[in-house]
Structures are given as structure tokens and as C-alpha cells.
Image (tube, helix red, strand yellow):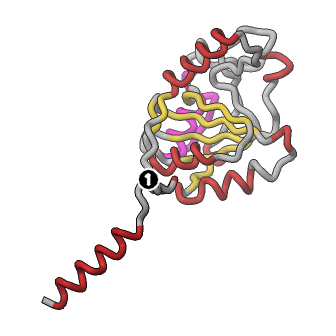
Amino acid sequence: MKKVIVLIMISLFFGCNKKNGDVTKSNVLQKPYIISQEDRKFREKIKKNNIAYIIIPNGVSVESNLIIDENSNIYYYQKNRIADIICNYGMQNDTIPEYLDLQPKDLIKIPKDYIENFIDENVMNKEKRRRILIMASQTDTIKDQKFLSFLHNTKVPTYVIRRTTQEEDTVLSYKKKNAFYYSDEIKWDKSRIKFPK
């Protein structure tokens, strides 16, 4: 009987300690992020409000990039060049991504619990104009709560969420299989990737 009374008192103490409506960000489930839906909303808002903006083509990569695979694993890769977003893409209506010569060794798997720390260390410590992050998902809907929490609380000033490219999907597949990757032997769909001339 004493044990029951002690359990009731403990539950009342902890239950009454919470104020109504006091909800922290960590215990709130984030709703799924649907890339196509958010992109459509963004374009409608731009059109409705006649706002000037730079079109970032599908598949563009910048210096810092994340890939979210179909199992919600997160990979990071960095390229030494910044895409020609400002110089070229604003002038063209080109939506075919360029070949990056991405290699399986370039992809670093990040534990979900450390996304924010990793991005702080590898993106937020760069000079201001280089604090750009591309987040590419293999699925149109991102449901992983740890990633959604990161997204909701991100400090990155400029980011884009898009679907993965043919090259990212291919290289990620080879990375997961731990297989030898020779880009020359891949049968690329050249309507979905642009190779240098």
C-alpha cells in the first residue's frame, strides 16, 4: 500500500509541475516536410507578391551539401567550388544539373544526433557569403524527426531543400554497397545530367 501511495504522489508531483501550454521544441513532433509542396507554395508566394529572387536550378550543388537517403540516413559532401548560381543560372532557364565528379569517398555519414554540431563546425564557421547549405532528399517527403528538428532550428542563413540528382543517387548507392566506382562505366541518362564539353 505504501508503494502505491508513493507512486501516486510522485506522479502527482511531476504531473502538476508542468504548466498547461508549456511545450518545448524538443518534445513537439514536427510535421513532415514535403519538398514538392513547399516548392509549389514558395513559387506561388513569389508570383503573387511579385518578389525578385534568384532561381536555383534543380540539382545545383554548392560548397556544403547534405543527402538524406530513403532510410533517413544523412550524408555530407563538400565541393571546392561554389556553383555558378549568381553568374550563370540567373541568366539561363537551365534545370539540368552539372556532373560533379562526386566519389563515394566524398560522402561522410553523419549520426543524426550530431547534425547540428556538424553543420555548425563545417558550414557556420565559414565566411558569411559561404554559409550556404543544400539539403537533398531521395524521397519527396522528409519524416525523420531528428532531421526535421534540425531543419526547424537551423542557424544556416541560406539553404535549399531539393530532391537528389542522378549522380548523387548513383554515388550513394556505390558508397552503401562498398563497391568500386568508375564513373566512366555508368550508363548515365544524359537528359538528367550535363557533362563538361
Residue 154 is situated, as x and y percent measured from the top left of the image, at: 64, 46
Q: Quadrant of the N terminus?
A: bottom left
Magenta-span inclusion, residue 146: no
Residue in view at x 41 percent, y 70 percent: 17
Residue in view at x 68 percent, y 12 percent: 49
Q: Nearer the viewer, residue 84 or 2?
A: 2
Q: Quadrant of residue 133?
A: top right
Number of on-image labels:
1
Q: Nearer the viewer, residue 1 or 149?
A: 1
Q: Secondary structure at mark 1?
A: loop
33 up-or-down from 13: above or below: above
Dominant SS of magenta comes to helix
* Type of amino acid at the residue the image marks with label 1: Gly
Residue in view at x 79 percent, y 14 percent: 90
Residue 79 is situated, as x and y percent measured from the top left of the image, at: 75, 39
**What stretch of residues is rendered in magenta?**
168-188
**Residue for badge 1:** 21
Residue 177 appears in the rendering:
no
Q: Residue most toward the left?
A: 1
17 up-or-down from 100: above or below: below
Residue in view at x 61 percent, y 37 percent: 135
Magenta-span inclusion, residue 182: yes
Q: Nearer the viewer, residue 88 or 188?
A: 88
**Left or right: 131, with 104 as reference point:** right
Residue 103 is situated, as x and y percent measured from the top left of the image, at: 65, 41
